Amino acid sequence: MAYQKFKELCKNKYFVDKTNIIKKFNELLNSPINNVCITKPRRFGKSSIAFMIIAYYSKRRNKEFKEIFNKLNVSKNEDINTEKGKSKYEETMGKYHTIYLDFSKYHEGFKYLNDYIYVLEERVLYELKDNIEKNEHGPIILEKINNLLDLFEIKFNKLAIFLDYYYSITNEKFVFVIDEWDYIFSNDKYTINERNMFLSFLKNLLKDQAYIALTYMTGILPIAKRSSGSSLNCFLEYSMLKDDIFYEYFGFKEKEVEALCKINGKLKLEEMKEWYNGYSIKGENIFNPYSIINALINNSTGNYWTNTGPMKEIKENLNFNIYGIKDDFLKLITRESIKIELNGYGAENKQQQAVNGRKTKQRSVIDKNENMRNEMYSLMVVYGFLTYNNGEVKIPNKELLEKFKQILNDKNEFEIYNNLMNYSKKMLEATLTKNTKDVCQILEKVHTKRSTIKGYYDHITLEFIVKFAYFDAQNKYDIKQEETRGKGFVDFIFYPKHDNENKTVIILELKVGKSAEEAINQIYKKDYYAGLRRLGYKILLVGINCTKKDKKYDCIIEEYDENKSKQNQNNDDISEYSSNDQNKNKRKNNDYDQVQKKRKYDLRKRK
């Protein structure tokens, strides 16, 4: 199956060559650390890499696949001054036995995991023996191994023992590809003891085994959370929480998406960036590949995120408001980041939850603590709902933002969110129609609903209130904060998106304890609208002020006024002239003082 799948991938119109990852694997091949576990969210290309590895390393059909790989990046020598890269390709391509295991398949009909593992081993052994028997000395080798197995009455770990015997006779090694390794942990069908037995099975099969040239294991859940031990500590682990080596091969880079858009001819890069970009690793943005391909096939951007993962668990955690998580989410859905140093999340956490009787449905309101908060954020990063970079988590793109809005759309469980969402939808309309009364009322309502804002009130607090009040405007406007414009930094500026028929730019300035008029005057004084009218935009100026004492809002909304602009410029010129004049007078006075001092000194000298 893996061979055929890879051939189909290569023929795809939107195929992206990721075969350079094999060069990374070749560095680990036959080394002391040759087991790699790379876990990513669903539909991030993990299985495609698995099919590629089988097709590349396998002795079966190696001539057929040599023709394919000869045209791909893995066969190209990066260093023109050496043949090392080329020789590595020749030495490794099609030179190994390969074993492919997918632990998400064929569980139906098995009541116990032990039965499933037994049948799985027997199936793999059957295929191995069939292939070995076709070799020149195959029958003799098989007879020796079978005699040994019968002699010691081997019933458990038969696959590991068979491979060990085979290697001792032939000195031939195997490449293991294990897909969906964590299915056993994400499926509630199996008990804690069965899961522990599964870990033991993998340990016996893979740890410190001479017959292994390389193991590529993948899934969604890491084996263990960061900074902790594991029974499978023989693996190098890379996940959405930390991956500086393999990140570029799981998901698409911007230049790859740009090339795909050119092939498509209809979709634009900027639109794809808005919807599917945002997984930032080492300063490079990674796109969701599954959604990108679906958008290209359908010639339409939209939400293609698969309905998998712990959505129910996330929803219940929000309901329990674990360690203020609801307040965090108000920030996240306004595209802010949350600072947090994540501890990680893996299969170990799943086991511990079950041991402690702390499955999601059994959690109580009392179970609110920082560890739970950290665990939930780690889980959401692992499953791809959030991105984690430089000690901060955030919602990566519009696709995931829409997903979270669906979670919050339950009127019974998330009434506070729905009220705030409704206010947000009215806010943009009130602004565009210059309804300052409604704007102030909405700001006061949003303020009241935000229970964490008490007592102390400053510009940063007001910025957050305004962000949430205009949350729905993100659908039609590209909202920039603290952007350099004119002679300073504007608090907020709303640029209409390409599909927005209303070509009005909204410039918004905030004040605390001053006046809305001062905010408007600052927009003119700092020339925040510079160059926008030449681009054909209408300009709407919004000044908002909130009193410090009683938290009352006042607002001015007006269209750009050329006369006011000139008047402010003239006032600036007069102010500058006056300032220069004063400086001149100061210099004159200083000169006069210096002359007088010199005269007095000369007179004293004469005396």
Image (cartoon, rainbow, N blue to C red):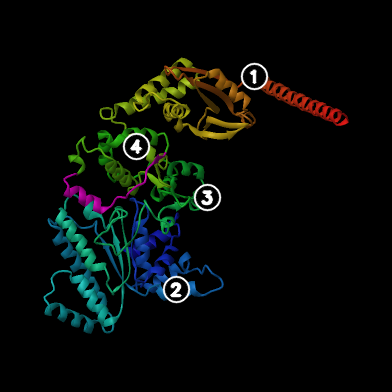
Q: Magenta span has 356? A: yes
Residue 127 visible within the image: yes
Q: Nearer the viewer, mark 1 or mark 3?
A: 1
The type of residue carrying mark 3 is Lys
> Circle 1 is placed at which residue position?
564
Q: Looking at the image, which residue is at 13% across and 61% down?
A: 115
The type of residue carrying mark 1 is Lys
Towards the viewer: 260 or 545: 545
Q: Looking at the image, which residue is at 51% across and 75% down?
A: 83
Separation of disc 3 and disc 2 at Cα? 34 Å
Residue 72 visible within the image: no
Separation of disc 2 and disc 1 at Cα? 71 Å
Residue 88 got which mark?
A: 2
The segment highlighted magenta reads 337-358
Q: Nearer the viewer, mark 3 or mark 4?
A: 4
Q: Classify mark 4: residues with Cα within 10 Å, few (<14), some (14-19) or many (20+).
A: some
Query: What SS does tag 1 mark?
Result: helix
> Circle 4 is placed at which residue position?
404
302 is higher (above) or lower (below) than 524: below
Query: What SS does tag 4 mark?
Result: helix
> Circle 3 is placed at which residue position?
262
Query: What SS does tag 3 mark?
Result: helix
Q: Are marks 1 and 3 in contact (CB under 8 Å)?
A: no
